[in-house]
Image: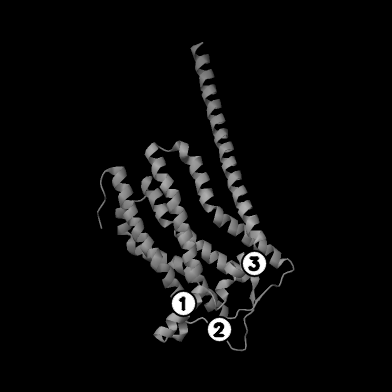
Amino acid sequence: MTEKLTTKNEKKKETEKVMSFWDHMEELRMHIIRSVIAIVVFAVVAFLNRKIIFDVIILAPSKPGFFTNKVLCWISHKLALNALCISDINLDIININMSGQFLTHMYISIVAGFIVAFPYILWEIWRFVKPAMRNNEKKYSRGGILVATLLFAIGILFSYFMIVPLTVNFLGTYQVSPTVHNQISLTSYISTVVSLTFAVGVVFELPILVYFLTSIGVITPAFMKKNRKYMFVILLILAAIITPPDMFSQVLVVIPLVLLYEFSIIISKRVYKKNYGKADEQD
């Protein structure tokens, strides 16, 4: 009789676990649906504001009147360095596919929707994992959402105003011979701008990643200090991947990445000290 009751209790517990798992999946599904709705809403807004999205934002770095291009020209005049001035850039951007412009419009609208909805998506992720957190973890994680959003926005703005104009100028005007003229396809231009902007925005989330990995004990500040020189090499390789093949753009990306890594070491120290009661000061 006792064995039968034990078996029934075990089956009941297994059923509760299965129900709990599917409840979590249903909750996750609702968070994903709400995030997708937010992206779609902002994407529709972006789609309806085509002139602002393309003429004012996307295509602006290819024009001499862009803010960064004018600043570089001003600096070049002051320092007598004509190489910095981007005043004669005149890209011939063309479309070669029947549906190319419409599909590009749709694609950019979705990307814009995701970027604008990014804080809300982070909030939905936080709401999903919040029940599994302790009270002090909930308190710190709220600030983490704000920091992650700010870092993502700073990365996007830095790439858009610093890396994208230099990339467009270098790749758009580079010629192997004066007889070979550049005609840049719309999809090529868009993919370059979006990939650069989005990649740098994601890379700027490095401190958040370090915070999480230190919290779960995967890395320590001592490990980050000890492997600093190897990380610098990795950052150089990463900068070379996400930037065009010119040293100036790579340096522009490497400098903030190195600063972010050093800042991440400070974050790792604080998290390690809070979790383990002491900071690992080994160099």
Q: Which residue is mark 3?
A: 51
Residue 23 % position (x, y): 56, 33
Pick the residue in front: 94 or 53: 53
Query: Do labels 1 and 2 touch, CB within 8 Å?
Result: no
Real-space Cα distance between discs 1 and 2? 14 Å
Can the viewer see residue 236?
no
Badge 2 amino acid:
Asp
Residue 95 location, quadrant = bottom right
Real-space Cα distance between discs 3 and 2? 24 Å
Residue 77 in the figure: left or right of residue 38: left
Badge 3 amino acid:
Lys
In terms of secondary structure, where does tag 1 sit?
Answer: helix
Q: Which mark is residue 88?
A: 2
Residue drawn at x 51%, y 19% is: 9
Q: Is residue 44 above or below residue 166?
A: above
In this view, the residue farthest toward the top is: 1
Residue 250 in the figure: left or right of residue 54: left
Residue drawn at x 50%, y 48% is: 122
In terms of secondary structure, where does tag 3 sit?
Answer: helix
First along the sequence among labels 3 and 2: 3
Residue 234 location, quadrant = bottom left
